[in-house]
Image (tube, rainbow, N blue to C red):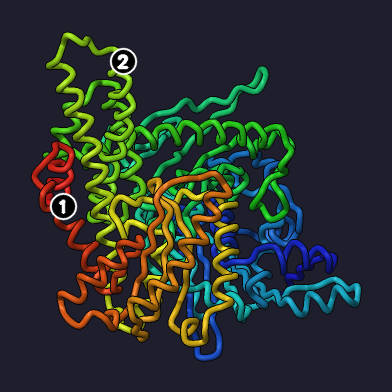
Amino acid sequence: MSEKYDLNIDLNVLNHLGLNLYSNVPAVLSELIANAWDADATKVTVCIKTEPDNQKIIVQDDGCGMDSKDLQQKYLTVGYQRRTDSSGDRTPAKQRPVMGRKGIGKLSVFSIAREITVITKKENDKLLAIRLNVEDIQESIKKQQTYHPEVIGQPSDIILGDSGTVLILDNLKKRVNESLGGHLRQRVARRFSIIDTDFKVFVNNDEITLADRNYFGKLEYVMVYKDFDTKKFNLGGECISTRPHLLKDGGSSYSIGGWIGLVRESGALQSDGDNLNKISILTRGKLALEDILDSYREGGLYTKYVIGELEADFLDLTEKEDIATSSRQDFIQNDARFEKLRSFVEQELRVLKQERVKLKDSEGEARAREIPAISEWYDGLGSDSRTEAKKLFGKINQIATDQEHRKTLYKHGVLAFEHLQHKEKLNQLEQLDINNLEAAVQLFSELDDIEASWYYQITEGRLDVIKKLTADVAENALEKVIQKHIYNHLWLIDPSWDRATETPSMEQTVTAEFNKLSENLTPEERKGRIDIRYKKTSGKHIIIELKRASVQIADSALMGQVDKYIKALRKQLNNANEGGPVEAICLIGKDLTDWDDRESRERSENSLAAKNIRVVTYKQLIKDTEESYKNYLDKARDKGRIKRLLDEIEDS
């Protein structure tokens, strides 16, 4: 064979622009597909062949192909700039906008393959075939010698038509083998917007289509730019809005194409190992920047639902400076055109945020109204209140995880909404006409209804706490459970005791006195006690002593112990000039030894009560508390507009 070709390249150029240019197979294939586009091809096939000890990628197009001169001056010349030659900015036959620019994309193949075979044929010319080996190229560079690709014959399994080019990427590097899975088609599809009837791409004989992008069906709302074909979206007209697409830059204006959209569920953007939560930038129909969304510090929840593809050809104008990085996967960040694009996207994200709020509010209202009770309640609100309620339903619509969760949020949301109305009702008291008794009765009735609903919800919550306390608790563990909760939930002892109100200084002083007394306890007395503390609630000073469930004590001994603490507490209250009744509560596991029968128990309880001491067993405490709250719920179950509303939501 008389042909002789040479490749002159510095080793650093090969390392930076070849071996390390790209990190994944789809990025490399996109460069080869772009070359086919620039060659006026109508069809590109990507075939992955797996052999026992090897895997190879074959990329074939039916483009114009190359003759010997083209192969040397265009393909083997690193840095050849296609757009500056006689062909110009457009391809000769189909007048396509040329994608290639720097003339280094061809080196991308070296980042995934150790051996590359090029087979090409120009119409009315002979077929040419050469093979390049990375190790041989590196060796020639080290020896400062010119590298001559091996001229070979046509492989028997390769068939070319009148014209076209085949590239065989052989001896693939191990790190790329896993990238050649079943998702290659969709990853290639997501890197181009020009794949259509005039330019078809096949992977393993399957044509890549719009559906391979696998995200249009996930969209619930989309903003489109320029003359974007909305028929590609399977959405109703109300879910698509057309936005202005011109960017003004002094006396110039740039045009934006493509779309930005929202998906219904953020999880939909995690697809086949890819994170689709991004806005890609394409120039001349090819991916130029994976994600511009990542460059913003916008941390709103809505950003987790954003996806988009924007066409920004003005970033790759032939007559202007090339601002793409060497890898062709990013741009010079401080370039004026790129900064203009960033500002535009930032503005559109703000619009998208507002649109999502409106979308979720309307959707939330519709979902809430599916429950007749809520629909009736909503219709009964004033116009301003309905606006706020719609926002409430929108928030619930965004955070609810399932139907049961949504019902719970509706109940709490409606109740919270009614609570907000409570202040307005109280303000109306000042404007009541004392002669209008009927209006006063109506207003007080509404206030009673709201307050009843509050307490009803509190009571239900407290019963849930009681159920958790008693669920699967062994008798010998009940004292530990009570100890953990009793001091923060005084309502377990008395429903009227909502929360402690003692000052920290008083609590510290009393605790110090109690500790002094406890030091004088006998070993037996100390063994029988878990804890003793002081609390104040509802104007009453309370001593709570917890006895071990396994210990049994006589009422006289108990009275003698507790009376000392009552006297110590009264002393501290007198010193602080603070009055109020004092009561001691003793929680025990076993009945007192004096409680032989009903009569003896009554005498014991009366004697203790005379000293303001109340004795309750752990089990009786839980039982009495549960019954008192259940009794209230039973009596109040059928009362109140709000309560009926909440029940209907629960039963829906």
Would residue 268 be found to the left or right of residue 604 on screen? right
Would residue 401 be found to the left or right of residue 213 on screen? left
Q: Which residue is drawn at 60% across and 47% down?
A: 99
Q: Where is residue 15 in the image (x, y as percent from the top left)?
A: 78, 68
Q: Which of 587 and 170 is in front in this view?
A: 587
Mark 1, residue position? 633
Q: How crowded is mark 2: few (under 14 residues within 10 Å), some or many (20 or more)?
A: few
Q: Position of residue 272 (x, y in %)?
A: 43, 66
Q: Which residue is drawn at 54% across and 74% down?
A: 518
Residue furthest to the left: 638
Specify which label sits upstream in the sequence, 2 or 1: 2
Q: What residue type is labelled 2?
A: Glu
Q: Which of 362 and 626 is in front in this view?
A: 626
Q: Where is residue 623 in the image (x, y as percent from the top left)?
A: 21, 68
Q: Residue at x 40, y 46 (%)?
A: 539
Would residue 355 be found to the left or right of residue 310 on screen? left
Q: Position of residue 265 (x, y in %)?
A: 36, 52
Q: What residue type is labelled 1?
A: Leu
Q: Which of 362 and 374 is in front in this view?
A: 374
At mark 2, the secondary structure is: loop
Mark 2, residue position? 430
Q: Residue at x 56, y 35 (%)?
A: 346
At mark 1, the secondary structure is: helix
Q: How far apart are marks 2 and 1 (CA)?
A: 33 Å
Residue furthest to the bottom: 52
Corner quadrant of residue 420: top left
Would residue 235 be found to the left or right of residue 170 on screen? left
The disc label shown at residue 454, or none: none
